[in-house]
Image (tube, rainbow, N blue to C red):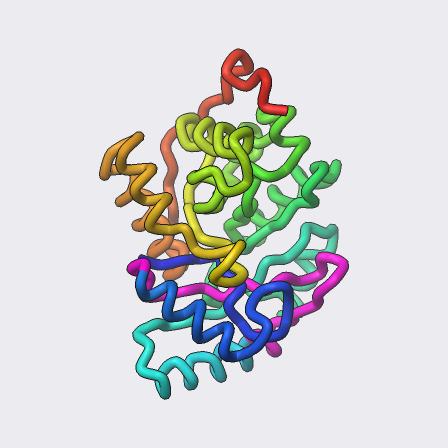
Amino acid sequence: MIDIHCHILPGIDDGAKHMEDSLEMAREAVSQGIHTIIATPHHLNGRYNNYKTDILGYVSRLNNRLQDENIPLTVLPGQETRINGEMIDHLEQEELLPLNGKSYVFVELPSDHVPRYTKQLLFDLQVQGYNPVIVHPERNRELIKDPDQLYEFVKNGTLTQVTAASIVGKFGKPIQKFTQQLIEANLTHFISSDAHNTTNRGFCMQEAITEIQTTYGNSLIYYFMENAQLATEGEIVVGDVPEKVKKKKFLGLF
Protein backbone atom coordinates (compact mmCIF):
# COMPACT_ATOMS: atom_id res chain seq x y z
CA MET A 1 0.00 0.00 0.00
CA ILE A 2 1.16 3.53 -0.80
CA ASP A 3 0.44 6.44 1.54
CA ILE A 4 0.63 9.64 -0.50
CA HIS A 5 0.25 12.12 2.39
CA CYS A 6 2.41 11.85 5.51
CA HIS A 7 4.48 14.14 7.75
CA ILE A 8 7.28 11.68 8.43
CA LEU A 9 10.33 13.88 7.77
CA PRO A 10 12.06 14.81 11.03
CA GLY A 11 12.04 18.27 12.55
CA ILE A 12 10.75 20.37 9.67
CA ASP A 13 7.04 20.82 10.44
CA ASP A 14 4.46 19.66 12.98
CA GLY A 15 5.06 16.00 12.15
CA ALA A 16 7.97 13.86 13.37
CA LYS A 17 10.07 15.91 15.78
CA HIS A 18 13.33 14.05 15.22
CA MET A 19 14.76 11.04 13.41
CA GLU A 20 13.69 8.57 16.09
CA ASP A 21 10.11 9.75 15.68
CA SER A 22 10.44 9.22 11.93
CA LEU A 23 11.68 5.68 12.46
CA GLU A 24 8.86 4.96 14.88
CA MET A 25 6.36 6.21 12.31
CA ALA A 26 8.04 4.08 9.66
CA ARG A 27 7.70 0.93 11.75
CA GLU A 28 4.05 1.69 12.41
CA ALA A 29 3.44 2.29 8.70
CA VAL A 30 4.98 -1.07 7.80
CA SER A 31 2.83 -2.80 10.42
CA GLN A 32 -0.23 -1.40 8.64
CA GLY A 33 0.82 -2.74 5.26
CA ILE A 34 2.36 0.44 3.87
CA HIS A 35 5.50 -0.08 1.79
CA THR A 36 5.84 3.41 0.29
CA ILE A 37 5.20 6.85 1.75
CA ILE A 38 5.24 10.19 -0.01
CA ALA A 39 6.58 12.67 2.53
CA THR A 40 4.52 15.86 2.30
CA PRO A 41 5.79 18.52 4.73
CA HIS A 42 3.83 21.75 5.04
CA HIS A 43 4.87 24.67 2.86
CA LEU A 44 3.76 28.32 2.92
CA ASN A 45 1.07 27.69 5.52
CA GLY A 46 2.10 30.60 7.73
CA ARG A 47 4.26 28.47 10.01
CA TYR A 48 6.52 26.36 7.83
CA ASN A 49 8.44 26.85 4.61
CA ASN A 50 9.89 23.68 3.12
CA TYR A 51 11.29 24.10 -0.37
CA LYS A 52 11.90 21.40 -2.95
CA THR A 53 15.69 21.17 -2.60
CA ASP A 54 15.49 20.91 1.20
CA ILE A 55 12.83 18.20 1.05
CA LEU A 56 14.91 16.12 -1.36
CA GLY A 57 17.81 16.19 1.08
CA TYR A 58 15.67 15.16 4.05
CA VAL A 59 14.11 12.31 2.08
CA SER A 60 17.52 10.99 1.07
CA ARG A 61 18.77 11.02 4.66
CA LEU A 62 15.66 9.31 5.97
CA ASN A 63 15.86 6.56 3.34
CA ASN A 64 19.48 5.94 4.33
CA ARG A 65 18.45 5.49 7.96
CA LEU A 66 15.57 3.22 7.01
CA GLN A 67 18.01 1.04 5.11
CA ASP A 68 20.43 1.00 8.05
CA GLU A 69 17.61 -0.02 10.39
CA ASN A 70 16.31 -2.69 7.97
CA ILE A 71 12.86 -1.08 7.86
CA PRO A 72 11.20 -2.13 4.57
CA LEU A 73 9.79 1.27 3.70
CA THR A 74 10.57 3.64 0.84
CA VAL A 75 10.01 7.38 1.27
CA LEU A 76 9.40 9.55 -1.78
CA PRO A 77 9.42 13.36 -1.94
CA GLY A 78 6.33 15.55 -1.94
CA GLN A 79 4.93 18.69 -0.40
CA GLU A 80 1.68 20.00 1.10
CA THR A 81 1.45 23.59 -0.12
CA ARG A 82 -1.10 26.07 1.19
CA ILE A 83 -3.00 27.53 -1.73
CA ASN A 84 -1.64 30.82 -3.03
CA GLY A 85 -1.82 32.79 -6.23
CA GLU A 86 1.83 32.19 -7.12
CA MET A 87 1.80 28.40 -7.16
CA ILE A 88 2.40 28.11 -10.90
CA ASP A 89 5.31 30.55 -10.77
CA HIS A 90 6.77 28.63 -7.85
CA LEU A 91 6.42 25.35 -9.74
CA GLU A 92 8.23 26.83 -12.71
CA GLN A 93 10.96 28.13 -10.38
CA GLU A 94 11.23 24.63 -8.86
CA GLU A 95 10.37 25.82 -5.36
CA LEU A 96 7.32 23.58 -5.24
CA LEU A 97 7.46 19.80 -5.40
CA PRO A 98 4.73 17.67 -6.99
CA LEU A 99 4.21 14.19 -5.57
CA ASN A 100 7.31 12.15 -6.37
CA GLY A 101 8.37 14.92 -8.74
CA LYS A 102 5.66 13.97 -11.25
CA SER A 103 2.46 15.86 -12.09
CA TYR A 104 0.20 15.65 -9.01
CA VAL A 105 0.28 18.76 -6.82
CA PHE A 106 -1.22 18.96 -3.34
CA VAL A 107 -3.32 22.05 -2.70
CA GLU A 108 -4.20 22.77 0.92
CA LEU A 109 -7.12 25.10 1.55
CA PRO A 110 -7.46 27.14 4.74
CA SER A 111 -9.55 25.28 7.29
CA ASP A 112 -12.35 27.86 7.43
CA HIS A 113 -12.89 29.10 3.86
CA VAL A 114 -12.22 28.67 0.15
CA PRO A 115 -10.33 31.60 -1.43
CA ARG A 116 -12.16 33.31 -4.29
CA TYR A 117 -9.40 32.55 -6.77
CA THR A 118 -9.42 28.79 -6.09
CA LYS A 119 -11.43 27.80 -9.18
CA GLN A 120 -9.18 29.81 -11.50
CA LEU A 121 -5.98 28.52 -9.92
CA LEU A 122 -7.10 24.90 -10.18
CA PHE A 123 -7.90 25.49 -13.86
CA ASP A 124 -4.56 27.20 -14.49
CA LEU A 125 -2.65 24.33 -12.88
CA GLN A 126 -4.34 21.88 -15.23
CA VAL A 127 -3.60 24.06 -18.26
CA GLN A 128 0.08 23.92 -17.26
CA GLY A 129 -0.03 20.11 -17.18
CA TYR A 130 -0.42 19.55 -13.44
CA ASN A 131 -3.04 17.50 -11.62
CA PRO A 132 -4.23 19.46 -8.57
CA VAL A 133 -5.30 17.44 -5.53
CA ILE A 134 -7.24 19.20 -2.78
CA VAL A 135 -6.18 17.62 0.51
CA HIS A 136 -8.63 16.81 3.31
CA PRO A 137 -11.62 18.77 1.90
CA GLU A 138 -13.79 17.04 4.49
CA ARG A 139 -12.26 19.27 7.15
CA ASN A 140 -12.90 22.58 5.38
CA ARG A 141 -15.77 24.41 7.05
CA GLU A 142 -16.96 26.25 3.94
CA LEU A 143 -17.05 23.06 1.87
CA ILE A 144 -18.99 21.33 4.62
CA LYS A 145 -21.62 24.07 4.43
CA ASP A 146 -21.51 24.31 0.63
CA PRO A 147 -20.36 21.00 -0.90
CA ASP A 148 -21.51 22.13 -4.35
CA GLN A 149 -18.25 24.08 -4.59
CA LEU A 150 -16.28 20.86 -4.30
CA TYR A 151 -18.55 19.23 -6.86
CA GLU A 152 -17.71 22.00 -9.34
CA PHE A 153 -13.97 21.61 -8.70
CA VAL A 154 -14.09 17.84 -9.23
CA LYS A 155 -16.38 18.10 -12.25
CA ASN A 156 -13.78 20.38 -13.82
CA GLY A 157 -10.92 17.93 -13.29
CA THR A 158 -9.57 18.53 -9.79
CA LEU A 159 -8.97 15.48 -7.58
CA THR A 160 -9.30 15.24 -3.80
CA GLN A 161 -7.80 13.22 -0.96
CA VAL A 162 -9.57 12.40 2.28
CA THR A 163 -7.88 11.38 5.51
CA ALA A 164 -8.10 7.86 6.91
CA ALA A 165 -8.76 9.25 10.39
CA SER A 166 -11.80 11.11 9.05
CA ILE A 167 -13.26 7.88 7.72
CA VAL A 168 -13.10 6.20 11.13
CA GLY A 169 -14.40 9.18 13.10
CA LYS A 170 -11.21 10.50 14.72
CA PHE A 171 -12.20 14.08 13.85
CA GLY A 172 -15.76 13.63 15.08
CA LYS A 173 -19.03 12.26 13.73
CA PRO A 174 -19.95 15.26 11.53
CA ILE A 175 -16.67 15.07 9.60
CA GLN A 176 -16.99 11.30 9.40
CA LYS A 177 -20.47 11.67 7.89
CA PHE A 178 -19.29 14.28 5.38
CA THR A 179 -16.39 12.03 4.37
CA GLN A 180 -18.82 9.21 3.69
CA GLN A 181 -20.92 11.56 1.57
CA LEU A 182 -17.87 12.56 -0.47
CA ILE A 183 -17.02 8.91 -1.10
CA GLU A 184 -20.59 8.05 -2.09
CA ALA A 185 -20.81 11.06 -4.44
CA ASN A 186 -17.51 10.17 -6.19
CA LEU A 187 -15.98 13.40 -4.92
CA THR A 188 -12.75 11.90 -3.64
CA HIS A 189 -10.04 9.84 -5.29
CA PHE A 190 -7.43 9.07 -2.63
CA ILE A 191 -7.34 7.95 0.98
CA SER A 192 -4.13 8.57 2.88
CA SER A 193 -3.02 8.93 6.44
CA ASP A 194 -1.90 12.56 6.85
CA ALA A 195 -0.06 11.02 9.80
CA HIS A 196 1.98 13.34 12.00
CA ASN A 197 3.00 10.87 14.72
CA THR A 198 2.02 7.49 16.18
CA THR A 199 -0.20 8.82 18.96
CA ASN A 200 -2.92 11.41 18.37
CA ARG A 201 -2.32 11.80 14.60
CA GLY A 202 -1.48 8.27 13.56
CA PHE A 203 -1.96 6.34 10.33
CA CYS A 204 -5.39 4.70 10.81
CA MET A 205 -5.05 3.13 7.36
CA GLN A 206 -6.00 -0.40 8.36
CA GLU A 207 -9.01 0.89 10.29
CA ALA A 208 -10.10 2.93 7.28
CA ILE A 209 -9.68 -0.03 4.93
CA THR A 210 -11.81 -2.20 7.22
CA GLU A 211 -14.47 0.51 7.38
CA ILE A 212 -14.55 0.89 3.58
CA GLN A 213 -14.59 -2.86 3.03
CA THR A 214 -17.50 -3.28 5.42
CA THR A 215 -19.51 -0.38 4.02
CA TYR A 216 -18.66 -0.38 0.31
CA GLY A 217 -16.88 -3.64 -0.52
CA ASN A 218 -13.45 -4.58 -1.85
CA SER A 219 -13.72 -2.83 -5.22
CA LEU A 220 -13.48 0.61 -3.64
CA ILE A 221 -10.38 -0.40 -1.69
CA TYR A 222 -8.70 -1.49 -4.93
CA TYR A 223 -9.79 1.77 -6.55
CA PHE A 224 -8.12 3.91 -3.91
CA MET A 225 -4.99 1.77 -3.84
CA GLU A 226 -4.65 1.85 -7.62
CA ASN A 227 -5.10 5.62 -7.67
CA ALA A 228 -2.26 6.06 -5.17
CA GLN A 229 -0.03 3.97 -7.41
CA LEU A 230 -1.02 5.94 -10.51
CA ALA A 231 -0.41 9.29 -8.85
CA THR A 232 2.98 8.16 -7.59
CA GLU A 233 3.96 7.21 -11.13
CA GLY A 234 2.47 10.36 -12.66
CA GLU A 235 -0.14 8.38 -14.59
CA ILE A 236 -3.73 9.48 -15.20
CA VAL A 237 -6.29 8.91 -12.44
CA VAL A 238 -9.82 8.67 -13.77
CA GLY A 239 -12.63 8.88 -11.25
CA ASP A 240 -16.29 7.94 -11.57
CA VAL A 241 -18.71 10.69 -12.58
CA PRO A 242 -19.07 13.08 -9.62
CA GLU A 243 -22.44 13.80 -8.09
CA LYS A 244 -23.68 16.56 -5.83
CA VAL A 245 -24.01 15.85 -2.13
CA LYS A 246 -27.72 15.74 -1.40
CA LYS A 247 -28.66 18.61 0.89
CA LYS A 248 -31.29 16.62 2.75
CA LYS A 249 -28.59 14.19 3.93
CA PHE A 250 -26.37 17.06 4.89
CA LEU A 251 -28.55 18.84 7.46
CA GLY A 252 -27.38 18.73 11.05
CA LEU A 253 -23.67 18.30 10.40
CA PHE A 254 -22.81 21.54 12.11
Q: Position of 181 compared to 10: left or right?
A: left
Q: Position of 35 compared to 152: left or right?
A: left
Question: Outermost residue toward the top?
Answer: 248
Q: Position of 76 compared to 200: left or right?
A: left
Magenta span contains residue 43: yes
Judge whether 75 appears above or below 116 on screen.
Answer: below
Q: Can residue 227 be seen in this view?
A: yes
Looking at the rendering, in which quadrant would you find the N terminus?
A: bottom left
Viewer-proximal residue, 217 or 198?
198
Determine the residue positioned at 60% across, 42% down.
123
| Chain part drawn in magenta | 32-55
Determine the residue positioned at 40% across, 55% down.
231
Viewer-proximal residue, 18 or 233?
18
Q: Where is residue 96 drawn, in percent x and y? A: 62, 65
Q: Where is residue 111 drawn, in percent x and y? A: 68, 42
Viewer-proximal residue, 20 or 237?
20
Q: Is residue 104 visible?
A: no
Q: Where is residue 182 drawn, in percent x and y? A: 47, 31
Magenta span contains residue 124: no
Determine the residue positioned at 59% across, 72% down.
17
Looking at the rendering, in which quadrant would you find the C terminus?
A: top right
Determine the residue positioned at 44% across, 71% down.
24
The number of callouts visible is 0
Which corner quadrant of the image does residue 230 belong to?
bottom left
Which corner quadrant of the image does residue 134 belong to?
top right
Question: Outermost residue toward the left?
Answer: 218
Question: Outermost residue toward the front?
Answer: 199
